[in-house]
Image (cartoon, helix red, strand yellow):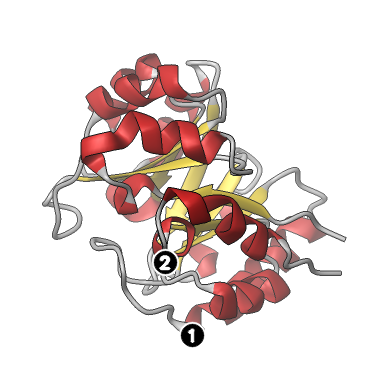
């Protein structure tokens, strides 16, 4: 049995009360705090930078799972690492030499992840699986929260689960995009270890966070 881990995305948080929101997630059973960084270039939206990671860090002991949807990416790795990130995930599409970026992330003593967009096949990261701690499968086209889950990506999740297990790799499989109770079950069945959930975590306000997270975590797969 795999334990499902939950990574609420603060993209859905109330930024006027971000510190409070983070502290509430910390006591509501979250496993990670997921931070979506978008540059308005690699994806069509602009969100937050390393200063937000730095501001969030004192409010939680949970790992900060930083997803960089930016290009170029190499010159920003040190800023995010030094701001308190525990995991930095880059997109394989964002740099012609992703292995170099992975090594740069690891040189800061933190974990490295590789992400792929819906249009990118699993084969694009086959050569990187031995060098990362996490693989992130986007189940929406990156750029905006609140999009609908793309069922076409379930096959990719299953393929990557087999690839990871076949190599007996200690690599977590994360899914991000359109995660609800219904789609979460599909993702977990397909092999996901970590569910990134924005709206599904924050729905109903702070009094509902623990219930929302518990409902998502209640999903297990053989």
In the displayed structure, does residue 39 sit left or right of residue 210?
left
Residue at the location (12% across, 52% down)?
Answer: 41
Rounded to the nearest angstrom, the CA distance separating label 2 from label 1 is 13 Å
Residue under the point 57% across and 74% down: 181
Q: Quarter of the image containing the C terminus?
A: bottom right
Instruction: Kindly identify which residue carries mark 2.
Output: 177
Q: For residue 194, what is the image quadrant?
A: bottom right
Callout 1 environment at 10 Å: few (<14), some (14 to 19), or many (20+)? few
- Using the rendered view, name the quadrant where residue 43 is placed: bottom left
Q: Farthest bottom residue?
A: 152
Q: Could one spot residue 125 in this view of the protein? A: no
Q: Nearer the viewer, mark 2 or mark 1?
A: 2
- Residue 39 lies, in percent from the top left, at 16, 45
What residue is at 65 percent from the left and 72 percent from the top?
159
Q: Is residue 193 above or below residue 120?
A: above
Q: Is residue 53 visible?
A: yes
Q: Which mark is residue 181?
A: none
Q: Is residue 72 above or below residue 209?
A: above
- Exactly how many numbered labels are in the figure? 2
Q: Which tag, 2 or 1, sits closer to the chain's start?
A: 1
**Residue 89 % position (x, y):** 44, 41
- The residue lying furthest to the front in this view is 207
Residue 91 in picture, x, y percent from top left: 37, 50
Mark 2 in CB contact with mark 1 (< 8 angstroms): no
Q: Which residue is mark 1?
A: 152
Which x, y percent locates residue 76? 26, 27
Q: Give the camera-side residue of 59 and 82.
A: 59
Q: Name the element at disc 1.
A: helix
């Amino acid at each position: 049995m795999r334990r499902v881990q939950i990574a609420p995305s603060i993209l859905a948080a109330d930024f006027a009360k971000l510190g409070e929101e983070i502290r509430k997630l910390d006591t509501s059973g979250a496993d990670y705090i997921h931070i979506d960084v978008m540059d308005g270039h690699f994806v069509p939206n602009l969100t937050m930078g390393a200063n937000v990671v730095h501001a969030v860090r004192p409010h939680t002991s949970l790992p900060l799972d930083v997803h960089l949807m930016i290009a170029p990416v190499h010159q920003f790795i040190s800023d995010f690492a030094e701001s308190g990130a525990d995991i930095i995930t880059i997109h394989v599409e964002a740099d012609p030499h992703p292995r170099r970026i992975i090594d740069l992330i690891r040189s800061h003593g933190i974990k490295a992840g590789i992400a792929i967009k819906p249009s990118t096949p699993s084969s694009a990261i086959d050569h990187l699986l031995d060098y990362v701690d996490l693989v992130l499968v986007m189940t929406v086209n990156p750029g905006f929260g609140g999009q609908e889950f793309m069922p076409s990506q379930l096959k990719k999740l299953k393929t990557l689960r087999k690839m990871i297990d076949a190599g007996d790799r200690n690599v977590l499989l994360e899914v991000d995009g359109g995660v609800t109770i219904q789609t979460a079950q599909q993702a977990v069945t397909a092999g996901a270890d970590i569910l990134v959930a924005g709206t599904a975590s924050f729905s109903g306000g702070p009094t509902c966070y623990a219930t929302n997270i518990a409902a998502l975590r209640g999903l297990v797969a053989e």
